[in-house]
Image (tube, helix red, strand yellow):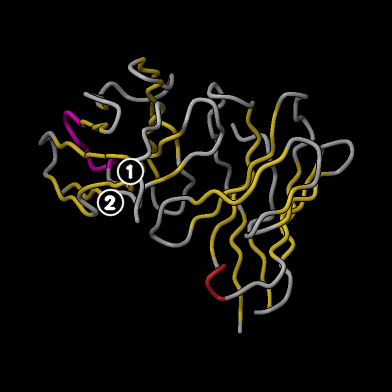
Amino acid sequence: DAMVIQNPRYQVTQFGKPVTLSCSQTLNHNVMYWYQQKSSQAPKLLFHYYDKDFNNEADTPDNFQSRRPNTSFCFLDIRSPGLGDAAMYLCASQVGTKNIQYFGAGTRLSVL
Amino acid sequence: DAKTTQPPSMDCAEGRAANLPCNHSTISGNEYVYWYRQIHSQGPQYIIHGLKNNETNEMASLIITEDRKSSTLILPHATLRDTAVYYCIVRVGGSQGNLIFGKGTKLSVKP
């Protein structure tokens, strides 16, 4: 059974229209991550939560925000999507005392 | 930037061992070597990791050189389902280390 679940698998939005991607995990992990993966590129870390502590990567655009209302759920908000934000967005979770990240299947975002 | 160097692509015959090399010459003493793979249109999947000793699990074996400057991931009997991009990543242990993905090796297993 999937342990890190991302919904939806495919998301289409319009240029400039806010969009939210969701991720949930059934593992009770205290660390959750969001990655962006553009076509034919490697995943790139956007930010992560260690418990409720938010850690933003230095080069993550302000257009990207995240919320973690509880241990199980984490959201990625793109406030004004541009064409360059079309990508696969990957969520992952990890237990703080271990070093293995478990990834969801990803949400592929298209911006029209 | 990623601290590893991998060949961009490799081929392997089905049923044969796949040996994927990785150079990490600037690895620090507290950094582990991790391997993940990503099958097309799926999220990355953890394979194995190690610090300095060789490691083996149900998926693969990891051979780390004594000076820790390089390592090899071994898939002992590759199948068509092992076709994927394989990422070698070095990261510090514990919760503070993040995964910085390099370009990886595209492994194609052929019948």
Whether the magenta-drawn stretch holds residue A84 is answered as: yes
Q: Is residue A34 above or below residue A60?
A: below
Residue A46 sits in which quadrant? top left
Percent coordinates x, y for residue A67 in the rendering: 24, 24
> How far separated are the C-alphas under marks 2 and 1?
6 Å
| Magenta span of residues | A78-85
Q: Which residue does the numbered mark 1 point to in the structure image?
A: A89
Please give the chain letter of the residue carrying mark 1.
A
Q: Which residue does the numbered mark 2 point to in the structure image?
A: A108
Q: What's the residue at 78%, 24% (across, down)? A: B29
Q: What's the residue at 69%, 64% (across, down)? A: B75
Percent coordinates x, y for residue A34 in the rendering: 36, 34
Please say if the residues under marks 2 and 1 sit with CB atoms less than 8 Å apart: yes
Q: Is residue A76 above or below residue A106?
A: above
Please give the chain letter of the residue carrying mark 2.
A
Left or right? Give the position of B98 relative to B5: left
